[in-house]
Image (cartoon, rainbow, N blue to C red):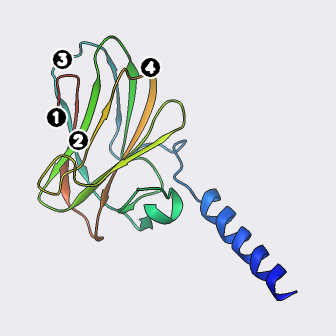
Amino acid sequence: MKSLLAVAAASAAFFAADASAQNFSLNPNFGSVSLTAGFTPDPYTVQILSGGNIDSSMTIGGNCRGTITDAPDFRLNYQAGSFDLFFSAISGGDTTLIINAPDGSWHCDDDSGGNLNPAIQFYGPMSGQYDIWIGSYSGGNHNATLRISELGF
């Protein structure tokens, strides 16, 4: 009986974490933009305050790290062309980047942009809604610049 209760408790914890995942139906904290392949200026930038009170490793899992908010920080509606799509964040603090792609897949990065900055590249990106969170690796908040580009990081 004890082992059955342990399995039930573990299952409940798994589904509770899954149910509290980030809510990309909420309005983004720092706005949104619609861009079409070949957009200018490139990079498109927006100022964001990183962080939040939700541990992304618990709600999204995988290799997602950092504290974030429930609502996305920013939303990109993108009409794809023949270019790759690059996202990065630049900050004086240790930030992370989490993106929910148009197909519902999650993409996360911690330091690929160098100097504790995250970066994610979509090869042959799809058209649609990209919801973006900039997290703080060890909590707190940091002023950050989100960069969206087709030319590179």
Determine the secondary structure under disc 2: strand
Quadrant where the C terminus is found in the figure: top left
Cα distance in 3D space between marks 3 and 1: 15 Å
Q: Which callout, 2 or 1, points at the residue further toward the start of the chain?
A: 2
In primary-sequence order, the first of circles 1 and 4 is: 4
Instruction: Indicate whether 127 appears above or below 15.
Output: above
Q: Amino acid at mark 2?
A: Ser
Which residue appears at 23% of the width and 22% of the height? 150
Tag of residue 153:
1
User: Identity of the amino acid at label 3?
Assistant: Thr
Q: Residues within 10 Å of mark 1 (few under 14, many from 20)?
A: some
**First in sequence: mark 2 or mark 3?**
3
Residue at (66% x, 71% y) in the render: 13
Dot 4 falls on a residue whose secondary structure is loop
Specify the amino acid type for callout 4: Ser
Q: Which mark is residue 127?
A: 4
Residue under pointer 2 = 88
Nearer to the camera, 146 or 122: 122
Residue type at mark 1 is Phe
Q: Is tag 4's residue or tag 3's residue first in the polypeptide sequence?
A: 3
Tag 1 or tag 3, which sits nearer the N-term?
3
Badge 2 or badge 4: first in the primary sequence: 2
State the image coordinates of residue 42 (x, y, percent, origin top left).
16, 23
Mark 2–mark 3 distance (CA, rounded to whole Å): 17 Å
- Residue name at image x 28 percent, y 16 percent: 83
Mark 3 lies on residue: 40
Q: Position of residue 116 (x, y in %)?
A: 17, 57
Q: Measure the alpha-carbon separation of dots 1 and 4.
A: 20 Å
Among the 4 quarters of the image, the one containing residue 4: bottom right
Q: Are marks 2 and 1 in contact (CB under 8 Å)?
A: yes
Mark 2 and mark 1: Cα distance apart in space: 7 Å
Q: Is residue 3 left or right of residue 111?
A: right
